[in-house]
Structure formats: C-alpha cells, structure tokens
Amino acid sequence: MEKQIHSIFNDEILMKAAEFYDMDDESLKKIGGFENYVYGYSLKGKEYILRITHSSHRTVGMMNAELHWVNYLSHMGADVSQPIASKGGLLVEKIPSGPDDYFLTSAFEKAPGNHVRQQDKTNALYEEWGRCIGKLHQLTKTYEPDKTYPLRPSWYEDPIFYKAKEYLLTEDYFIADKLFQLTESIKKLPKDQDSYGLIHTDVHSGNFFIDNGKITIFDFDDSSYQYFISDIAIALFYTMLNIEDVKERTAHSYNFLKQFLKGYRKENTLADFWLDTLPDFLKLRELELCVVIYRSCDMNNPDPWDANYMKNRKELISNNIPFIGEEIDFSSLYSDRM
C-alpha cells in the first residue's frame, strides 16, 4: 500500500464499511493487511473477513472481476475462501473519500484453521499445497470472465513493473533495469491454455490456512494473467527466505518441489520444460519484492521483516546471483523421472 493512503483512512471510513454487513456488536477487530486493510468479525458464531481497499489500488470493476473469479473457483470445488454479499446484495461496496477517490469493501467467509506453524511444514503440507494450486490452474482453463467487468490485468501491467524507478532511490535504479530486462525476456515465453491464464500469483503460506492437513486459499487481490509456473515459483520462493546456507537451500528446493509436484500433478499437467524457467521466475519475485518494499515502507526505519529481506539483497542482485544461491538443474523432477 502506498504510504499516503494511511493518512486518508480513518475510523469513519471503517464504520461506514462495517455498516454494509451484518455483524455481532463490537466483534470487528483489525487482523492485518499489506495492500489492504483487513479486519475480522463474527455473526451468529461464524467468523468472517472484511477487506477495505483504496481506489488507487483497485477499481470497482477490477475488484468485481476478482470476486467473480473466486466465486467460480468456489462453486467448482476449489479450496478457496468464499466471498459473501453485503446487506445490499453486492460483492463490492463503495465509500467516497474525496473528489476523485474512494474506498471499496468486500467480505469473505474466514478460512478454517490457522496459519502454517513450524511443525506443519511437512512433506504432506507441500503435497497438499501443490494439489490446491494444481486445481486452481486446471479450473482457470475453463473460466469465462464476466464481460460486465474489465479483465484482470496481465502480470506486467502492475505498476511495480513500469513505475519501479519512481519508488527506488537513484543509486538503486539498477534494480528497476534488471526487472525490466527480465520482464521483457519472460514476456517472450510461449503462451497457451495449458501454461498461461488467470492465477492467484501469491500463494505463499501467509495466504492460506491449514486445518487438519487441508488448505484453504484466500487473498486473490493480486490475481492476474500469468504463467502457471509463476505460482509454483512463488510457493518455493517464500519457503526459502529464512534458509541462509546455499547447500541447505538447494536441498530444500528439490525436496519441496518433489512433494509439491506430486500433489500438483494429481490435478493438472504442466509441460516439464517449464521447470527449467524456475530460476527466472524466482528472480522475478526477488526483484519485484525489492520494489514493493521501497514503495510501501520507510527505508530509514524498516520493520524487521523488510530489513532482513534487504540484507545484502542489492549486492546479490547486482552480482546476478541466482535466488537459490547457485545454478540448479531441475530435470530430475520431470514427470517421467519422479
């Protein structure tokens, strides 16, 4: 979320947002959010999520397009958090906040369970993670967007890609240059129904809950048209962030992908050669996340997560070090070799 939005949001907007939905008195509590303001609330013993978004981030049409897709996935049996309508029967409600800007509200059933804990990080979890994403990819092949709304964007249409230098310091423009070069290279990869479509784009462990081994995915706010392999790269990327030893990172990447692909291939088929592009998609997220941190955070006083991520990051990027830390051949994970 861009820094200036925090100065616009206030309790009055929050109360107006809450009025659109039936909820138990005093049950509304902030639970987090990065690109949006996210609150939890209850109604008759059931838990829900209220999401509030500024128009600089998403338009009414774009949010309706997101929720139309999530509804489709839910109705087709995907493991996703179901959107719910307001008192007025709408999936998206609008709150004016200025002459040309506004906030949007949406609500969802809360996913059962909790965030992944250390003891949950097992091969069984990785396999279920892959199965859930494989199902999303299989279902997106037959999804027909509602023509009433604009299409969700292509991945490279996010401002992070074309406005990167506006967020970076001058001495760090090389990050934007490398992001641009990699983006142009990836855009040349082949696109077809079996490799490219509307995907979540951010299924890390912060965007799903686990309940008795079953995953429920939420937060489709960044959904866009992108290569399926990107969802796989994102899952791998975030599992490696706190592993510093290169040999350990390499071993983890092989084991994670072996289990993940076992689950993924139960639901969807992706040509083996896409595994060869994983280093590029890992690097894409590494660069993109750098720009996001510059855009959204106070670089003079970063929070611990951001500071840890940026530690030596510019040096690694400048020297073209692969995200895993070394070049890796993933051909042993091809479908005919597992």
Image (cartoon, rainbow, N blue to C red):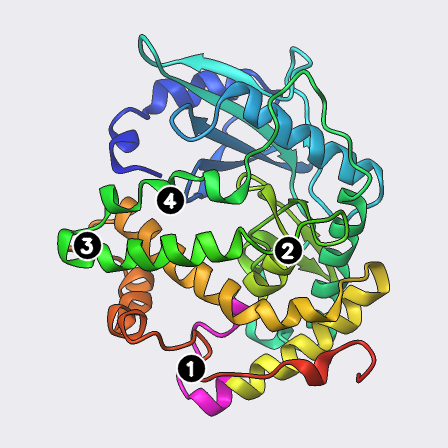
Tell me which segment is drawn in magenta.
236-249
| Front in this rendered view, residue 67 or 305 | 67
Q: Quadrant of the C terminus?
A: bottom right
Vertical position of residue 311 compared to residue 195: above or below:
below
Mark 3 or 2, nearer chain start: 2
Instruction: Tell me the tag on residue 299.
Output: 3
Residue count near mark 4 (Cα–Cα under 10 Å), binned few <14, some 14–19, many ≥20 = many
Which label lies toward us, 3 or 2? 3
Quarter where residue 102 is shown? top left
Between marks 4 and 3, how big is the CA–CA gap?
17 Å
Residue 241 in the magenta stretch? The answer is yes
Which residue is rendered at x = 77% and y = 40% of the image?
Answer: 73
Mark 4 or 3, nearer chain start: 4
Vertical position of residue 131 compared to residue 251: above or below:
above
Mark 3 or 1, nearer chain start: 3
Quarter where residue 190 is shown? bottom right
Question: Which residue position holds label 2?
Answer: 209
Residue count near mark 1 (Cα–Cα under 10 Å), binned few <14, some 14–19, many ≥20 = some
Question: Which residue position holds label 4?
Answer: 160
